[in-house]
Image: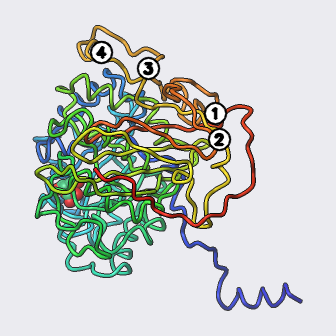
């Protein structure tokens, strides 16, 4: 009886699966890692630049740290031929794009390219709007594995989530129809609230205007601060703190296969100091942004290499649970700098195996002792999680960072990464390494915090303390929920 009603209804309305078209494919189960030329080279692209960078990324040990996509950004094309097919600029790419893809594949990489959901790209080269099927086929025929899809010259097809989603969905369907697995990286700068819907369209979506190489310097070209409910002009020249303060409100929408993209990394480009770059990298990892190197690797310095290869931080990014950390507190502090009000923040999130990542972020202008009570770390909507009643071992994720002498010797070609400070993800995935308890992924055991206790760490100016909490073996593990309303305690005054 029920069966026949069901059959009749499905004949009328068709069967429906929910959620629709999600996930779009089985790619990006953890955030994509790779290198993209835009931050360091902008339009100055070529076959030689791309292939020599790829060779250098491998020689520095970065490919085997997990940076597996080499992504060519804007300015590669020479318009369309008489059949309407996109053509590479033969001066920049004399051997064509398939050659580049094949070379990269033979070096153990995946290959990313760029186009735009508009009539032109942002650099005013041919865009893919209206040519989606043709271009998707072209990319697939070139053996492309990843498409970054921009938002310039979109002919006014934006302004509501529905209009934007429909425009981006056309390319999603076209890529799918090629039958080739192609990671789809949407780049519409957070316009029309993609975190609400883009998991049905893409593997990742930019949530802000373009990053620039400063920690907290405001710039009128990036006018939104994260305090407004709708950002009408995402802009560019957005600092690390600006992007983080926007991400705080929406980052929980990330999930395996579908990530908020905080934009490419600036580590190594020279506009921030070592603490600031450590903070930038830590936050991008804990918030599960794609990690795309954005530097000229031929001039990479030892500090940048030691940051970008830190296995204990990358293990958080690539953790199989795939949950982004949340901001648990934000306080303003009195030590301002020329860029305005300083602030401190606590971020925390679950990792696989019952671990927890905790980040104390000091965006004030002096070094300070920062505190995080377990109640703040494990705060939930329903009160405080029972995890507060456990004892926890504390691992510092920066303490075992590769020393600068070793990093320099790798850059000079005289040294090799050693397994005490380096992880080879080509040999064993982060997922398997974590499951097997590889100590290089855990950082350094620096102390404990007892049930209901408080963590205290020294945090450098514009720096972080990034920690992994792991239940102390044999700790009481009380399961009773501590149901208390959460209260912000205003103890930070400077
Ligand atoms: C911007 C995009 C940048 C870069 C640039 C190329 O819209 O956000 O990441 O791709 O276009 O012109």
Q: Are marks 1 and 3 in contact (CB under 8 Å)?
A: no
Location of mark 3 (residue): 421
Find the distance from the CA under tag 2 to the CA under tag 1: 8 Å
Label 3 element class: loop
What numbered label is drawn on residue 58?
none
Location of mark 2 (residue): 353
Name the image quarter holding the N terminus: bottom right
Which color scheme did the rendering employ for the protein?
rainbow
Label 1 element class: helix
Find the distance from the CA under tag 4 to the CA under tag 2: 33 Å
Marks 2 and 1: which is nearer the front?
A: 2
Find the distance from the CA under tag 4 to the CA under tag 1: 29 Å
Q: Is residue 71 above or below residue 303?
A: below
On screen, residue 427 versus residue 437, left or right, reads left
Q: Are marks 2 and 1 in contact (CB under 8 Å)?
A: yes
Which numbered disc, 4 or 1, marks the residue that appears first in the sequence? 4
Location of mark 4 (residue): 410
Asked whether mark 3 and ligand 1 are closer than 8 Å, the reply comes as no
Label 2 element class: helix
State the count of labels: 4
Which numbered disc, 1 or 3, marks the residue that appears first in the sequence? 3
Location of mark 1 (residue): 435
Which numbered disc, 3 or 2, marks the residue that appears first in the sequence? 2
- Quadrant containing ligand 1 reads bottom left
Which one is nearer the viewer's eye here, 312 or 80? 312
């Amino acid at each position: 009886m029920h069966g026949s009603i069901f059959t009749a209804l499905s004949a009328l309305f068709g069967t429906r699966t929910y959620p629709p078209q999600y996930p779009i494919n089985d790619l990006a189960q953890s955030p994509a890692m790779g290198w993209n030329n835009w931050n360091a080279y902008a339009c100055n692209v070529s076959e030689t630049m791309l292939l020599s960078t790829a060779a250098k990324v491998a020689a520095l040990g970065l490919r085997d740290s997990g940076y597996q996509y080499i992504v060519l950004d804007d300015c590669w094309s020479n318009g369309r031929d008489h059949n309407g097919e996109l053509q590479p600029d033969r001066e920049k790419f004399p051997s064509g794009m398939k050659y580049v893809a094949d070379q990269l594949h033979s070096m153990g990489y995946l290959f990313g390219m760029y186009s735009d959901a508009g009539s032109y790209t942002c650099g005013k080269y041919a865009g893919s709007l209206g040519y989606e099927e043709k271009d998707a086929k072209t990319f697939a025929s070139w053996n492309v594995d990843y498409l970054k899809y921009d938002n310039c010259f979109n002919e006014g097809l934006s302004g509501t989530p529905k209009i934007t989603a429909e425009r981006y969905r056309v390319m999603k369907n076209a890529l799918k129809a090629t039958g080739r697995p192609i990671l789809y990286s949407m780049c519409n700068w957070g316009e029309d609230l993609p975190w609400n819907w883009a998991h049905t369209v893409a593997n990742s979506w930019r949530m802000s205007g373009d990053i620039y190489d400063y920690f907290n310097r405001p710039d009128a070209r990036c006018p939104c601060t994260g305090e407004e409910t709708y950002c009408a002009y995402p802009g560019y020249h957005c600092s690390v703190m600006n992007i983080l303060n926007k991400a705080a409100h929406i980052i929980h929408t990330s999930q395996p296969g579908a990530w908020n993209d905080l934009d490419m990394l600036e580590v190594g480009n020279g506009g921030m100091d070592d603490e600031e770059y450590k903070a930038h990298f830590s936050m991008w990892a804990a918030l599960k942004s794609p990690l795309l190197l954005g530097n000229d690797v031929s001039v990479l310095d030892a500090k940048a290499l030691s940051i970008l290869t830190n296995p204990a931080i990358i293990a958080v990014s690539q953790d199989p649970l795939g949950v982004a950390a949340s901001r648990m507190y934000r306080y303003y502090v009195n030590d301002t700098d020329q860029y305005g009000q300083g602030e401190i923040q606590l971020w925390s999130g679950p990792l696989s195996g019952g671990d927890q990542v905790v980040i104390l972020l000091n965006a004030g202008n002096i070094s300070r002792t920062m505190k995080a009570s377990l109640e703040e770390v494990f705060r939930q909507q329903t009160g405080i999680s029972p995890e507060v009643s456990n004892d926890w071992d504390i691992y510092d994720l920066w303490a075992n960072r590769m020393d600068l002498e070793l990093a320099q010797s790798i850059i000079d070609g005289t040294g090799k990464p050693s397994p005490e400070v380096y992880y080879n993800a080509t040999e064993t995935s982060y997922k398997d390494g974590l499951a097997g308890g590889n100590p290089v992924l855990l950082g350094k055991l620096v102390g404990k915090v007892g049930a209901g206790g408080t963590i205290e760490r020294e945090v450098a100016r514009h720096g972080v303390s990034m920690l992994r909490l792991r239940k102390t073996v044999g700790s009481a593990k009380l399961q009773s929920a501590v149901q208390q309303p959460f209260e912000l305690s205003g103890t930070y005054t400077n």
